[in-house]
Amino acid sequence: MNTLKNILVLLGLSLVSGGAMAAGTDTQASADALVKKGAYLAKAADCVACHTTKKGKPFAGGVEFELPFGSLFSPNITPDVDTGIGAWTDDEFVSALQEGVGRDGKHYYPAFPYTSYSLMPRDEILAIKAYLFSLPAVKQAPIENTLSFPFNQRWGMFFWNALFLDNQRYEPDSKQSAEWNRGAYLVQGPGHCGECHTPRTIFQSLDKDQALAGAPIQGWQAYNISADPLYGIGAWSVEDLTHYMAKGYASGHGFAGGPMASVVEHSLSQLTPQDQKAIAVYLKSTPAHSSGIARATTDDLSARAVVVDDLGSKIFAEACAACHRWDGEGNQSPTAKLAGLKTVNDPAAANLLGVLLNGHSNMGSPVDQRMPNFAKGYNDQELAAVSSFVLKHFGQSGGVVTPEAVAERRKVKSH
Amino acid sequence: MHTLSINGNEQQVDVPGDMPLLWVLRDVLGMTGTKFGCGIAQCGVCTVHLDGKAVRSCVLPISSAVGHEISTIEAIGETEVGQKVQASWLEHEVVQCGYCQSGQIMSAVALLEKQPDADDAAIDAAMAGNLCRCATYTRIRAAIKSVSQA
């Protein structure tokens, strides 16, 4: 009798534990799926760009944002309990992204793009949290901000938020396709494109009447990406746009340099082809704004006589023409094409100087898509001369670059 | 495996597609006439022809060279213009140390194939990206001009 009882108990136990194991596998599978979903959304939201320093551990923070009234430093968002977000509840994390208010009621500054992330639904935000919590905890205390009074008063953001934070989730437009809505959501929400590409008002809020019309960022120009054919991306095909997102360039339209190179590397190129296409479809439908930098016209470039007669043209001949060619068509690389770019038609030469001083030296990119930097090879006068020549030869802006402008541009730090 | 057409011959090379053509020429195929200088398309010594156009082989991934006709300094004496340039080079005693000369000749031939009557301005523009640290520039220009003005 005892034996039979024991057998029954054992059977029962094994049934229970078997059931528990099956349930455990299901829970594990759904947890894994959530982390995977969060990892993708974290890429779409490009969290890593602002929360990781050049030599630092991923998501451990410490990136400096220089503002006219002091510096902000991004916080540690690894799951470390003391220095990161390891002790945060779901509600606290959701509040940070949707309302710009973190643990203990601390208000964020809008360098953290919560006015965009606010469009994201709770479940997607919690997926990001699950992903971040799956990463190794890094003990790294956040760096104190150095803002001056009154900007160091976080409570002041309460009023700013009252004016400029909608705190509403994305509402699909039923008149548009699912693809368009997906693109609009990615651009306005997690992608937070407007944070750099939309001009700001005097209150530092995004100027919604000028959405995606272009703005300066860290010495670079985040170009107009509204649907205007001359000033924006209206003349790009959907394929040009998806190629740019996937590979970092669209020949004759643009090459992702400066901060945008990082966006492509960590975010846009990591998206699915369907999402890249959705973004392209949406961008091509946005209201056109004819402001900012216009594309250069390329009418007579190939017919124009080559004259090497001043410092600028001599430097172009020695250092640039071999790859870029006098007609700007690019000699052996689709990325070397200068004809038709905005970069050669910006009178302030923001991105032209940026690329001359920084190069495109990402070692992950193919050898024919790299450009050496000329910061040490040429002095301010020489870089001013060659930049002025490039503007005159390939563009119509009439811009002239001074050695002083080059000296100023050299001082801009990029992270 | 990639198939390259070099100087009229099909060559099979088993290397990564992002390997620069210069590496393939020198290290894989042993064609050392094309030189390595800076590796960043700033000096011109690695110049070869891709469909007749002068290109810098140090920054040309072979995946971009597949399906195109590659010519190197080894075969330049087999073309009419190449022979003229070689003869003119000897006549003017252009070469000093010689390291840059493969690239100089490749750029000169590409120019003269496209513009047989090239004048000083065209020569200066086409040859500007080819450095010569012995500064034989005046002799290079004179040698090209003897062909173009002949």
Image (cartoon, coloured by chain):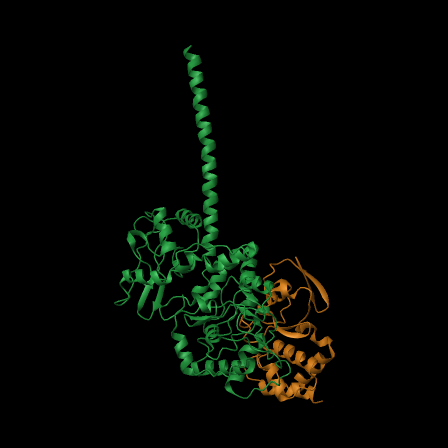
Q: Residue furthest left?
A: A149
Q: Is residue A278 left or right of residue A205?
A: right
Above or below: residue A352 compared with residue A259 = below
In the displayed orientation, state which residue is furthest to the top.
Answer: A1
Vertical arrangement, residue A388 with respect to residue A242, above or below: below
Q: Is residue A9 visible?
A: yes
Q: Nearer the viewer, residue B39 or A116?
A: A116
Query: Observer-nearest residue: A157 or A72?
Result: A157
- Pick whichever, A32 or A317, lies toward us: A32
Residue A135 sits above or below residue A328 on the image: above
Colour orange belongs to chain: B
Residue B136: image location, x then y, percent: 58, 84
Q: Residue at x 45, y 24 (%)?
A: A14
Residue B128 image offset from top left, x and y in percent: 57, 82
Q: Quarter of the image for the N terminus of chain A: give it.
A: top left
Q: How many marks?
A: 0
Q: Residue at x 48, y 48 (%)?
A: A37
Q: Quadrant of the C terminus of chain A?
A: bottom left
Residue A204 versus residue B129: which sits nearer the camera? A204
Image quadrant where residue A51 sits: bottom left
Can I make out residue B132 in this image?
Answer: no
Q: For chain A, give the colour.
A: green
- In the rendered image, residue A256, in percent from the top left (x then y), is placed at 51, 67
